[in-house]
């Protein structure tokens, strides 16, 4: 016999599942988009490390304070780890205190954005405009001159020093 507690627990669980689906990720929007570089899942897995694949292709997130790019202070360019498109200049990098590499402005025609409703909140997801790789999110609490904080997963980026001999 089903008592009220069991009935309410089941109803709450179903409601929670429905809410997760409603507030779910941006996968349907991603599926409809077309990018210059498109590869199969197997091709991406062969090219990327498992951690990079999770972030760039499955919109995962690395643990804060784990990226070696946090301590990267040389002049150069941060590019997409998926397709090597230059995304950010080192001149726009700053320490946001969040544990992820942060920038106040991307390079021209480098990134795209879309609405991300995961975890029951609305954020702006940032992706590589050429391969669609997930890079992180942008927030409006950054420094001047833009007031933006592009909070990027370090594993989604590769760094190219301006002067390769400055290592």
Image (cartoon, helix red, strand yellow):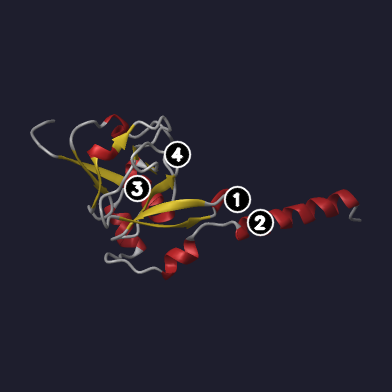
Instruction: Decide which of 125, 51 is in the foreground and name it.
Output: 125
- Dot 4: what SS? loop
Count of number-bearing discs: 4
Marked residue nearer the N-terminal end (3 or 2): 2
Mark 4 vs mark 1, foreground winner is: 4
Instruction: Decide which of 56, 144 is in the foreground and name it.
Output: 144
Residue 84 is situated, as x and y percent measured from the top left of the image, at: 22, 52
Residue at mark 3 to residue at mark 2: CA–CA distance = 29 Å
- Dot 2: what SS? helix
57 is higher (above) or lower (below) than 73: below
Marked residue nearer the N-terminal end (2 or 4): 2
Crowding near pointer 1: few (<14 within 10 Å), some, many (20+)? some
Residue 19's tag is 2
- Dot 1: what SS? helix
Residue 141's tag is 4
Cβ–Cβ below 8 Å for labels 4 and 3?
no
**Occupied quadrant, residue 104:** top left
Q: Dividing the image into 4 quarters, which one contains the N terminus?
A: bottom right
Residue 134 is situated, as x and y percent measured from the top left of the image, at: 38, 53
- Residue at horizontal 41%, vertical 32%? 99
Circle 3 residue: 52
- Residue at horizontal 57%, vertical 49%? 121
Circle 1 residue: 120
Marked residue nearer the N-terminal end (1 or 2): 2
Crowding near pointer 3: few (<14 within 10 Å), some, many (20+)? many
Residue at mark 4 to residue at mark 3: CA–CA distance = 27 Å
- Dot 3: what SS? helix
Residue at mark 2 to residue at mark 4: CA–CA distance = 28 Å
Residue 55 is situated, as x and y percent measured from the top left of the image, at: 39, 49
Cβ–Cβ below 8 Å for labels 1 and 2?
yes
Marked residue nearer the N-terminal end (4 or 1): 1
């Amino acid at each position: 016999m089903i008592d009220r507690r069991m009935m309410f627990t089941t109803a709450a669980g179903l409601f929670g599942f429905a809410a997760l689906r409603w507030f779910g990720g941006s996968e349907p929007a991603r599926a409809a988009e077309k990018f210059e570089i498109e590869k199969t899942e197997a091709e991406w897995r062969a090219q990327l490390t498992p951690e990079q694949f999770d972030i760039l292709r499955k919109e995962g997130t690395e643990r804060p304070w784990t990226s070696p790019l946090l301590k990267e202070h040389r002049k150069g360019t941060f590019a997409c780890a998926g397709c090597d498109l230059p995304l950010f200049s080192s001149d726009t990098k700053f320490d946001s205190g969040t544990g992820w590499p942060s920038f106040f402005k991307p390079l021209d025609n480098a990134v795209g954005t879309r609405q991300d409703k995961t975890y029951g909140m609305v954020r702006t997801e940032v992706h590589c405009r050429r391969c669609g790789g997930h890079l992180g999110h942008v927030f409006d609490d950054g420094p001047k001159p833009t007031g933006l904080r592009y909070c990027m997963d370090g594993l989604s980026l590769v760094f190219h020093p301006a002067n390769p001999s400055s290592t």
